[in-house]
Amino acid sequence: MNMRTLLCVNTDEVWCPPPQLSSLGWHICLVSSPQEAFSLYAQQGPRVGLVLLSEGSAEALEALFRQTCGTMIWVALVPPHLLAQPRMQELLLNYCFDYHSLPAGDDRLLAVLGHAFGIACLRGNTLRPCDHGKESGGLIGNSPAMQQAMGRVERLARVDSSVILQGESGTGKELVARQIHRQSVRADGPFIAINCGAIPPSLIQSELFGHEKGAFTGAWRRHIGCVEMAHRGVLFLDEIGDLPLSMQVNLLRFLQERTIVRVGGVEPIEVDIRVIAATNRSLDQEMAQGHFRADLFYRLCVLDLALPPLRERGEDIMLLAQYFLTKMGGILNPQVQGFTACATRQMLQYHWPGNVRELKNRLERALVLCDGHRIDHQHLGLSLPQAEGGIRPLNLVRAEAECEAVRRALVLCGNNVTEAARHLGISRLTLYRVLERSTPPLPPEAQLS
Ligand SMILES: Nc1ncnc2c1ncn2[C@@H]1O[C@H](COP(=O)(O)OP(=O)(O)OP(=O)(O)O)[C@@H](O)[C@H]1O
Ligand SMILES: [Mg+2]
């Protein structure tokens, strides 16, 4: 982005940006909260941010800084009384290029912002603006929905309360649970996962809490259960909605008392764990139908996170597709470099009932089947519904509108890619990506320069 866009986050009313900024060529986007700032960042990709630190905004600002600092440079304005606060000092040291205590001299501020913009442009040559969130512990996603989820993961990792993760099958609940564990104070402790739906009801008690030798026929030695194994770590209760009612009482008792007794044992054993539970069912509905205990739900659901289905993540579909292609392609089929326009279009249009897991599995299959350089639609085997009543998926409409805009710009700029990209306010790389997806492909005689 060549325009000098300044993202001003004014969390308090005590300050307003110097009027000279506009005459110096700055385009100012003024927002009043870190949340608004993030959505503007996602839309416009500014390079420089000016933020007024205020009491109570530290957590939200840190999340904003973390998500944007790969591609933005931040300058802070600090009310003098906040400068002495260790939390504010930490933010300044970790994320800000420079700061001024208020009142800030306009001239000095303008000079610093100019300097910040220069540095941001230099960095811009080596950074790809919207790819910053690309990999965060294996969790891929740039869509606003996923960025929001990732921000929440970070916050969930900082506390020790129980969490419920909700989302359709294959949306990444286990991946997120592992991420929370990895980023938390329990990272050095174990992460023990148990699938409540996959164990016969008669064995669940012993699987969770363990048993003593001779507790029942076949218990020929002591068995340590998952809860005990997860001591000082995280217990991941997958498919919690499938836990039989009788076991729900036992789990509730454990959560209240934080001690267990092994089956056939007498001694209570203290266990220190954090519980993360996941479900792809609606627990509200399960509770209404009397299949899930409300008291257990409220114990578990101190915090929650809902993962969006893949079809609602827009461009993440292609980001993930490319990620899996790179990850698996090297082993399965190194000659495959990308996707045909038709494959891309179908992937954006498909409903993805099995979400990210389905995408990954279909790509694995496609890599095995593909004998060219690009995965085509027939390798993916997606069955697409006919468009109903003229309503078309937003992903597709968006992708087509982008292609159209790029084509038009190229025509107007005589196929000069650099010029077209400049007018569109995107990088050459982004322009090529959009072109790659377009159908019909650009005519071969078009000489792009
Ligand atoms: N955002 C993501 N980025 C990269 N890989 C992902 C992402 N989300 C999911 N995956 C991958 O997709 C697969 C399914 O994820 P996971 O097992 O965490 O889903 P789940 O929600 O627990 O599914 P289920 O409800 O069926 O148990 C895994 O291989 C995981 O690594
Ligand atoms: Mg799972």
Image (cartoon, rainbow, N blue to C red):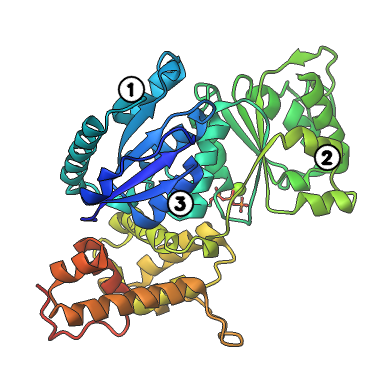
Residue 182: horizontal and vertical position, in percent?
Answer: 49, 30
The quarter holding residue 269 reads top right
Check whether the beta carbons of the residues at disc 1 and disc 2 lie within 8 A of each other.
no
Instruction: Give the crowd class for mark 2: few <14, some 14-19, many >=20 residues within 10 Å.
Output: few
Residue 235 at least partly seen:
yes
Q: Is residue 226 left or right of residue 284?
A: left
- Spatial CA distance of label 2 from label 3 is 50 Å
- Spatial CA distance of label 1 from label 3 is 24 Å
Q: Which residue is mark 1?
A: 93
Label 2 CB less than 8 angstroms from ligand 1: no
**Closer-to-camera residue (406/101):** 101
Amino acid on which disc 2 is placed: Ser
Which label sits in the foreground, 2 or 3?
3
- Spatial CA distance of label 1 from label 2 is 55 Å
Q: Which residue is mark 2?
A: 202
Check whether the beta carbons of the residues at disc 2 and disc 3 lie within 8 A of each other.
no
- Which element type, helix, strand or loop, lies under badge 1? helix
Residue 214: horizontal and vertical position, in percent?
Answer: 82, 22
Amino acid on which disc 1 is placed: Leu
The residue at the point 61 percent across, 87 percent down is 389
Which quadrant does the N terminus fall into? Answer: bottom left
Residue 235: horizontal and vertical position, in percent?
Answer: 64, 31
The quarter holding residue 391 reads bottom right
The residue at the point 12 percent across, 80 percent down is 414
Identify the mark at residue 39; answer none if there is no mark: 3
Q: Is residue 375 left or right of residue 233?
A: left
